[in-house]
Amino acid sequence: MKTLFTLLCTLVLFNCAKNKKSDDNSSKSSLSTTEANSESSAVAAGNATNVYWGDTHLHTGLSMDAGLFGNTLGLDEAYRFAKGEAVTSSTGLNAQLSRPLDFLVVADHSDGMGLFQAIDAGEDWVMETDQGKRWNQMLKEGKGADAALELIKAFSQKEMDMDPNAPELQKSVWSMTVEAAEKYNDPGNFTAFIGYEWTSLIAGNNLHRVVIYRDDKDKTIDYIPYTNYASSDPEDLWENLTAYEETTGGKVLAIPHNGNLSNGIMFAETRVNGEPFDSSYFKERIKWEPLYEITQIKGDGETHPFLSPNDEFADFENWDKGNLDLSAAKTNEMLKGEYAREALKQGLSYKNEFGTNPYKFGFIGSTDSHTALATSDDNNFFGKAVNVEGGAKRWEHPFVVSEVDTIMTWETIAAGYAAVWATENTRTALWDAMKRKETYATTGPRMTVRFFGGFDYSEGDLENLVDSGYSKGVPMGGNINSSNGKAPTFMAHATMDPESGSLDRIQIVKGWANADGSLGEQVYDVKWSGDRAIGENGKVPAIENTVNINDGSWDNTSGSVELKALWVDPDFDPNLEAFYYVRILEIPTPRWTLYDKLKYNIEMGEEVPMTIQQRAYTSPIWYNTERIKK
């Protein structure tokens, strides 16, 4: 626990200024003394008492694109790095986390598992194709990154000369993946989940899902991952997951990749096969996909200024240029099918019409790193792929180039992590917490966040937050049902990451569906640092940006070590379905681009941001109009 740090910072805040670092390498939650006492009661009640940090979306050199980009690191290095050990990156750089993670999902692509190694070795079945011979030669000439972009394009458009899923190769690599997870899984200390990424692409539109098993080797070793070449339709993936559970008695879930490269089809208005939605589809979707990846290296997926024009923080690291391979441009009409907040609102509308909410998902963040290094720290960022692990020129390297547009490497962000509230650090406990959505996402910092909803909280409950939170209501990811018109009450608490910025504010984001089918949203500032007053526009003014561009320092005294609030919805309508989630904002801190600027003594274009206002998003709490929720 970071109890000592929290108490010291609360009593002597000045000592936390000027980017002071903590020597405590624990990744467990920061709790006040009162809350620590409350945790004892929560333990007795069987409630979640610890927050565990991890990455549910990491690629090693076994992913075909990662290998072609130059990733020479495998499963061992990925796990060792996540557990806090020092490793040498594919480009020879020293790499180590300042604090270990608690869990990891190595999610290598189901399609093309081990294909890079086959191309590199010039195996006969590869060299029988023109593409195979070309990519093999490009690797020999040191043009692996160019080969990777060609392969991604060919794969996404289903124009590959070879079968990327040779059965024997796929079985061999999957066995390696499962065995490594078993080797590094250490119940109580570190959880290595068995999983993969189903790499669905429809003409370049990204519908990827990370599949995570609750189970061990005995159930998973013989169940080969489902592939995009088998089908690009999520309904077929769900059918495959159904067969797995029925065959093995195991449990599995899927997490959709953030949708900003899907060109609107992640939350489309029809099924992938073009048929209209029905209640059966909605029930299957929420059964298998209880979580959503809201932030990662390839941009943030909470909302967009076009969708949320009254939210001054909506313009955050948005990617809105096109699909995964930039084979098709983005239009504003596509955006509503890509962002989490809009999907949550649309889910309420579907609930009113069909009786089931298919988008009743919680939030996690993860890296989607293809370097085998699960880091989302701006001062320790190894980029999306090995070809941009480091160097003075990486900021200006084109990430994707096409006739449609270009995405530059400086537009990638050092994000994110998944935070899971669970009873213990085991596959079972963490997976169960994911299934019930007691999770939150951050863009990298490990701030501790609690969020509870109910109808009977009072100010005094803030001093007994955890015990009262569970006994009188529900945690993040839960449901509260109609209580004879009474407005719901929420408790939110956040503690800063001692290695990051102090806290600017707690916000509660509300969304609802009106009776006429229209959708609404509102962002409320419920607690903030300092003595700022709400302006005439009804908003709390922006906090000062204290980042020194010349040396990368900042002043944490401009924000708060912790923020805590009790909030009652002032605009509550008992007849409208609604959701509420917490967004935590830090004060501005240096972005990875500033660290590169200082490290390499270079200048960057004016378009490149030097600072970032990191954030956390909790899973929502849903208000249901019916008295009894089935």
Image (cartoon, rainbow, N blue to C red):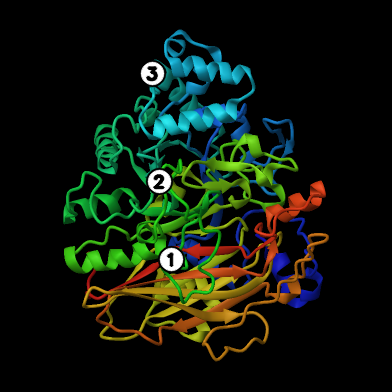
> Residues at badges 1 and 2 in contact (C-beta under 8 Å)?
no
Q: Quadrant of the C terminus?
A: bottom left
How many angstroms separate mark 3 from mark 1 (CA)? 43 Å
Residue 221 in view in this figure: yes
Residue 264 in which image quadrant = bottom left
Asked where in the image residue 594 lies, by quadrant, the reply is bottom right
Q: Which residue is mark 1?
A: 476
Q: Nearer the viewer, mark 1 or mark 2?
A: 2
Q: Which residue is mark 2?
A: 328
Q: Secondary structure at mark 1?
A: loop
| Secondary structure of the residue carrying numbered label 2 | loop
Q: Earlier in the sequence, mark 3 or mark 1?
A: 3
Q: How many marks?
A: 3
Q: Nearer the viewer, residue 254 or 610?
A: 610
Type of the residue with mark 2: Ala
Q: Residue at x 72, y 76 (%)?
A: 558
Q: Residue at x 81, y 71 (%)?
A: 15
Considering every residue shown, the one lying at the far top of the view is: 124
The answer to whether residue 63 shows anywhere in this view is no
Q: CA distance from mark 1 to mark 2?
A: 37 Å
Residue beneath label 3, please? 166
